[in-house]
Amino acid sequence: SVGAGAALIGLVSAVPQLIWLSERKSLVFGIATAALLVSGAVLWRARRLPCPVDPVAARACMRLRAISHTLYGVALSAFSLAIVFAFLLPRWMG
């Protein structure tokens, strides 16, 4: 933990804007929530759009569609974990 503390002090001294972000975490998480909602809506709307007729392009389209859904799931998981660490654990521990 001594090394992590020193690394955090070095990071905050190199990027002092991190203090501003941590003081306004509700705003940061609000913007992130809006971005995730918009991207989820776009993915939902595009789920039934046709892929190209060309077989190679159609395979690429389907593969990229699957990758997009996977990345969206990873982003939702990371966001959920961040919510726990930023908002829930401090209330439970304090």
Image (spheres, grey):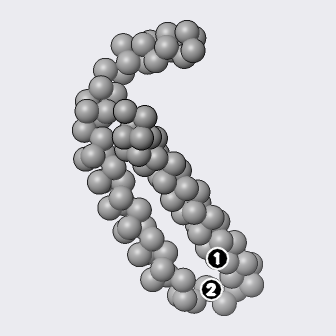
The mark that comes first in sequence, 1 or 2, is: 2
Q: Nearer the viewer, mark 1 or mark 2?
A: 1
- Provide residue 47's location: percent of width, then percent of height: 54, 83
Q: Which residue is mark 2?
A: 52
Residue type for callout 2: Pro
Answer above or below: position of 59 versus 92. Answer: below
Q: Residue at x 55, y 9 (%)?
A: 2
Residue 28's disc number: none
Q: Residue at x 63, y 64 (%)?
A: 70
Q: Is disc 1 in contact with disc 2, using a CB cutoff of under 8 Å?
A: yes
- The answer to whether 36 appears left or right of 7 in the picture is left
Q: Is disc 1 placed on a helix, strand or loop? A: helix
Any part of residue 81 in sight: yes
Q: Which residue is mark 1?
A: 61
Separation of disc 1 and disc 2 at Cα? 8 Å
Q: Residues within 10 Å of mark 1 (few under 14, many from 20)?
A: some
Q: Residue at x 48, y 80 (%)?
A: 44
Answer above or below: position of 55 versus 28. Answer: below
